[in-house]
């Protein structure tokens, strides 16, 4: 399996690829560039939306708009482009980071301190009606979040811990946090993740130049090397959800290669799960 370049780009901090099945496009962001990108594999069409703040994640909304995890909270772009806040909670020195939509349509949105102060971030659950609940309050770099095919488990990464943790899901709540896997030193740091139709967890390894797949029992069964040093997140998309898209970053790299910051794709990597839209 070999990575191809889907979108050549010099994103400072590319993140959060998400397949929008309703439009046949992939959504991803450049956090520090304050840009939301879209890409349609079928025709190659691209769009770029500039945001007023650093944008940690962008997810499709059930109404055809976008929900965005910004520096000061979670906002919404309506289909006509009009912006409004859904949950605004500015904290000095903190910004939104990765986010994911749960099977019930709620957004789980993480944050982090710009200087990566330990415990400077959190994880919230934003219900479709706009009600926000803090789930975790001692997070350093909130990153990948995903659910098992039956929705009974939630996987979560706080990158500084080097772990992917797993929770049991009970309605709108999670409990029983425990270690799923730990990424060994010198292999990179776990960043964004996705779960495939077999229940396997795929994770991008920051500073590891690779994505890995772990079985539901936590066994490493696949490693795919990449031509970028800082892959940040991965998601299945395209026809049949068989292609794995991987975002990447060039921030902090000395003499980055031309591919750093591009959106990559691993054709035919597996079979992904349909991703729900945020329900307004």
Image: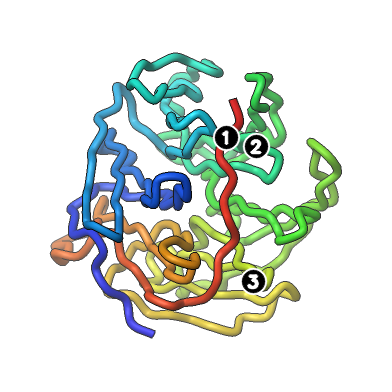
User: How far from the left and from the top, in percent, is residue 2?
Assistant: 33, 82
Residue at the image position 31 percent from the left and 67 percent from the top: 229
Please report whichever mark, 2 or 3, sits nearer to the chain's N-terminal start.
Answer: 2
* Residue that carries the numbered disc 1 in the rendered image: 278
Q: Nearer the viewer, mark 2 or mark 3?
A: 2
Query: Residue 106 sits in which quadrant?
Result: top right
**Residue 224 drawn at (x, y percent):** 43, 80
Q: Hey, which quadrant is residue 188 in on the image?
A: bottom left
Per the model, the C-alpha gap separating discs 2 and 1 is: 5 Å
Residue 226: numbered disc = none
Q: Residue at x 49, y 57 (%)?
A: 191
Mark 2 or 1, nearer chain start: 2
Classify mark 3: helix, strand or loop: loop
Mark 2 closeness class: few <14, some 14–19, many ≥20 residues within 10 Å = some
Horizontally, residue 34 falls left or right of residue 189, namely left
Q: For mark 3, what is the residue? A: 200
Residue 166 position within the rendered picture, expressed as x and y whole percent measured from the top left: 73, 57
Compared across the picture, whether 171 is left or right of 184 comes to right
135 over 231 or under it: above or below: above
**Residue found at x 43% / y 38%:** 58
Answer few, some or many: residues within 10 Å of disc 3's Cα (few below 14, many 20 plus, some between 14 and 19): many
Say which of marks 1 and 3 sits in front.
Answer: 1
Point out the tag, 1 or 3, that comes first from the N-terminus. 3
Residue occupied by mark 2: 105
Q: Nearer the viewer, residue 191 or 262?
A: 262
Q: Are marks 2 and 1 in contact (CB under 8 Å)?
A: yes
Q: Nearer the viewer, residue 193 or 270?
A: 270
Q: Residue at x 80, y 43 (%)?
A: 174
Point out the image quarter for the C terminus: top right
Relative horizontal placement of residue 187, taking residue 34 as reference (left or right): right
């Amino acid at each position: 399996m070999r990575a191809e370049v889907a979108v050549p780009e010099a994103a400072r901090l590319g993140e959060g690829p998400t397949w929008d099945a309703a439009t046949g496009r992939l959504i991803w962001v450049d956090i520090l560039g304050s840009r939301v990108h879209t890409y349609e594999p079928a025709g190659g069409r691209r769009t770029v939306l500039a945001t007023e703040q650093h944008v940690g994640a962008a997810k499709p909304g059930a109404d055809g708009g976008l929900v965005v995890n910004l520096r000061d909270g979670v906002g919404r772009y309506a289909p006509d482009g009009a912006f409004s806040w859904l949950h605004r909670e500015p904290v000095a020195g903190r910004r939104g980071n990765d986010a994911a939509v749960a099977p019930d349509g709620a957004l789980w949105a993480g944050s982090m301190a710009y200087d990566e102060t330990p415990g400077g971030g959190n994880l919230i659950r934003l219900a479709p009606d706009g009600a926000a609940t803090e789930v975790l309050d001692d997070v350093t770099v909130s990153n990948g979040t995903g659910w098992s095919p039956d929705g009974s488990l939630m996987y979560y990464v706080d990158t500084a811990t080097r772990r992917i943790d797993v929770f049991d899901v009970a309605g709108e709540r999670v409990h029983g946090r425990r270690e799923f896997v730990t990424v060994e030193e010198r292999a990179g740091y776990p960043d964004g993740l996705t779960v495939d139709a077999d229940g396997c967890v795929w994770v991008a390894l920051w500073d590891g130049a690779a994505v890995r797949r772990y079985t539901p029992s936590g066994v490493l069964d696949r490693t795919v090397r990449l031509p970028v040093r800082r892959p940040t997140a991965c998601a299945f998309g395209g026809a049949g959800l068989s292609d794995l898209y991987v975002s990447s970053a060039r921030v902090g790299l000395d003499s980055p290669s031309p591919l750093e910051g591009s959106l990559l794709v691993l054709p035919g990597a597996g079979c992904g799960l349909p991703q729900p839209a945020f329900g307004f």
